[in-house]
Each structure stands twice: as C-alpha cells, then as structure tokens.
Image (cartoon, rainbow, N blue to C red):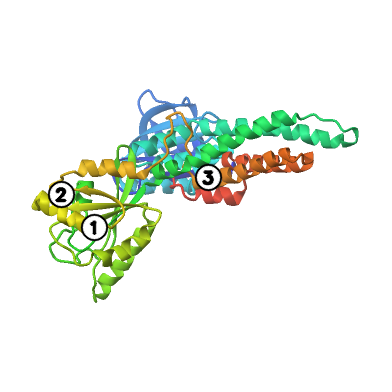
Amino acid sequence: MKQDTICAISTPPGSGGIAVIRLSGPKAIAIADQLFVPGKNGCPVREQASHSCQYGQLMEEADKVLDYVLLSVFRGPNSFTGEDTVEFYCHGSLFIQQRLIQLLIQLGCRQAGPGEFTQRAFLNGKMDLSQAEAVADLIAADSSSANQLALKQMRGGFSKDLADLREKLLHFVSLIELELDFSEEDLIFASRDELKKLADQLESKLSALCESFSLGNAIKNGIPVAIVGETNSGKSTLLNKLLNEDKAIVSDIHGTTRDSIEDLVSIRGLSFRFIDTAGLRKTKDRIESLGIERTYQKIEQASIILWLIDSTQLSEHIDWMADRIIPRSQGKKLLLVFNKTDKIAGEELGIVENLFAHIPGDRIQISAKYGQNIEELKSKLIELTNLPEFDKTDTIVSNIRHFEALSAGLEAIRRVREGLQQNLSGDFIAQDIRECMYHLGLITGQISNDEVLGQIFSRFCIGK
C-alpha cells in the first residue's frame, strides 16, 4: 500500500461549482508537477511549500489547458494520510473531473478504494481506529448532536480513556506473569487489593460506556417513530407537517398510502426517523394488503408508535385496531394522538377519548392540518425517548462494534473480580485480564486484522 499513489474525487458525485480531486502517496507531488503549470509568481509543485495553495493551469496536453485550478500540497508526514498529498480544486464539470482522474491514472496513480485515504491515515499512525470510524460518522451526521458526537470521538478522548485503562491492566498482568515465573519462591508482585480497586474502577467505567450506547445509537441513527392508524386519520398530513414539506400524498380517498414513507427530522438536536405507514383497515385489495403488512413490520421495528386517531369519526374498529397495534407495541412507547381537533368541540372530544380509555399509552390532542399542538407533540416525543442523562463531557458510545467489544471486556473484568474474590491462581486471573485488554485493543486498532479493517473502511465513501 505504501508503494503506490492513489487518487479519487473527494466531492459528491455530479456537477457543481467546485470539485476536489485528491491524490496521496510517494509519487503524488511528482505526478501533480507534470500536470500543473503555476501562474504568475508561482512555482513548480515540487518546490511548493507544504500546507500552501497556488493558482495555475491544469494541462491536458503540453499545449492544451483543461482547466484553471487551485492546487494544495501537504507533505508527509504532516498530512491527513501521513504521506505526500496533493489536492486539485477544479471546476465541477463531470468532464473535467473524469478527465483529470484519467490523466492521473495514466501517469501512475491507482483509483482509491472506499475509505482508503482514511485507512492510510490509520496505518500511518495519524489516528487510531475509533478516530478513523468517527470520520465516517462525521460525514454522515445529520443533526447537531450527531455532529458533536463524531467530533468528540475524532479528538481522541474516547481512545485516551481506553488506552489508560489498557495500560493499567498491562501493568498488572505483567506483574502477575512475573509471579508465575517465580512460582517456586511463592513471591507476590501484584497487590491483590490494588488489582481489586482497578477491577472495580474498570467495571464502573465499562458499564457506564455500555449504558451510554442507547443514547449514542439514538443520536447517530435516529429514533424510529411509526405513524399508524386507520385510513384518512391524517397520518400523511402529520408527516408533511413534521417535515415542513409535501413528502406524502394527502387525499380524501381511503387507502392512498400503499407503502411506507420515511424521513429524518431533527428535534432539539436529536434525530427522529418518522415512518408514514399504510392505513389499517379491512380490505380485499391485494396491493393495499401488502402495504398493511409492511405497517405491521414498521410497528415492530419502531421505538415509538404514534397511533393517530380521527377525532371526528366514532370508529367501529377500535378493538380490531388495538388487537393489531398493541401486541406489536410491547416494550415500546405508545402515544395516542387525537387528530382533527379543530373540527370538534371539547365535549365531543371527551366522548371520543373515553372510547379509548382501555387502551394503554400517553395521549395528546393535535390538528395536523393547522399545526396545532405540533410543538407539544415534539416535546412529548423527546420525553418518550427516555434516554439516559449524560453530561456533555461524558464519553458516549455510538458504534455497535465498540459496544460489542466493551460488553465483552466488561464480562472479562467481572470474571477478574470474581477470581480475586475466590482467590484463584494468578494464571487464571491473568487470562481474564488479557481478554479484557484484547477487546479494548480491538476498539482502538491496537489489535486488528485485515478482515476487520476491510469491513470498517468498505463503509466509507470513495475519496475519504
């Protein structure tokens, strides 16, 4: 990998005002030098200072200009990848982008794979594995909370915490193994009292990190909220109001929504993934029946279910609906949303609500069409998430791979505590300590293999 030079388009696919083409590797500067002619008072790329930018011509042939561009040079090891890196900032024409990539390949570059620039940064020691994964999270962040979470992980606070814990474990396992070397002399180098204190500290820390995953996962991926109810109860109208756009078709015709429609909405920095579903009713229409089956699937996948009720209609199917919604809502939050309250008097609304008195769940009254109580609905959604409270300085785990490794490390350190209580021999305790160290090392990349790295970086976009 260190022998070749890679190139890729680092901006999103398509035309735009500006495109960024990046190349990194031992020949990056030499290759760029063959294509770039500096402007007035400029210098050849090979003489350009690191972390500087200059204007010039991008040459397709010796006497043929392809574009007028800016070019930046970042000399290794003080670059993102740790290697010599060059970036072309050209106009965003698809032709210019593809032609430049073609020229770079002709001069000896190789097309970069997904995440290969970040992978090189990891392999060259510019960041650890958890920081590299945070790069992908930062690119994908769609809320302020997700953005801040990724930035915090990129700064390395999480990695430092794990490295400190692993270093302390390494100290003790070294002393225990030294005891094993002098087993005939019956010497004790590792204080069991100090090891017990460390095990208690680690269990508390790892347990807190594992508990933070529910919040981190919600921040990163959004909280799924299924909007369900009878046909024409106003589900699509509510989705459009929450999104502030006409995402779903709204019609007086029953059964308009035949499939699920999803979109993300950020509410007070937290992402909610709202799912508008096909209306529930008895039907012989095959296509509509398939849509209703998908509604059932979405209820089971959601964390919060909004059961939207048309307050102007005394439904004859309350129990029929309840039999299909409530069993699929076990372990989830159910919110009964009485809609169209702008069309009904308070006394009549009370009668409608009494019909649902036997249904468990919170209640709220809204008018989706006119936006009445929508802010109250949003507040209720934040309340229903029931996410744990964490200080802004706390480390929050959002990556499922990290959560699984931390959970395994937590189990190992609990075995260490049990072994100390039972006065097990040092070799058994050392084995559990090593296992905990192994799982912590998997997170930061101190222990890794090509298969794991391949899975991680394959999820990156090309050019990053």
Q: Which comes before the other along the chain, label 1 or label 3?
A: 1
Amino acid carrying label 1: it is Phe
Give the Cα separation between the discs numbered 1 and 3: 40 Å
Tags 2 and 3 touching, CB below 8 Å: no
Q: Give the number of the disc on residue 444.
A: none
In front: 151, or 265?
265
**Please, what secondary structure does the residue beneath circle 2 have?**
loop
Q: Which residue is mark 1?
A: 356
Label 2 CA crowd tier, 10 Å (few <14, some 14–19, many 20+)? many
Residue at the spot 79% in from the left edge and 29% down from the top edge: 189
Which mark is nearer the camera, 2 or 3?
2
Horizontal relation, residue 396 to residue 349: left or right: right
- Horizontal placement of 226 versus 341: left or right? right
Q: Position of residue 322 (x, y in %)?
A: 29, 63
Mark 3: secondary structure: helix
Does residue 361 appear anywhere in the picture? yes
Q: Which residue is mark 2?
A: 367
In the figure, residue 371 lies in which quadrant? top left
| Residue in the picture at 51% in, 39% down | 132
Q: Nearer the viewer, mark 1 or mark 3?
A: 1
Circle count: 3
**Residue 370 higher or lower than 230, as above or below:** above
Marks 1, 2: nearer the viewer? 1
Where is residue 42 shown, x and y percent of the image?
39, 25
Residue 340 in sight here: no
Mark 1 and mark 2: span between their CA atoms? 18 Å
In the image, residue 203 above or below residue 329: above
In percent of width and height, residue 408 lies at: 60, 46
Q: Badges 1 and 2: C-beta atoms under 8 Å apart?
A: no
The residue at which mark 3 appears reads as: 403
Kind of residue at disc 2: Ser
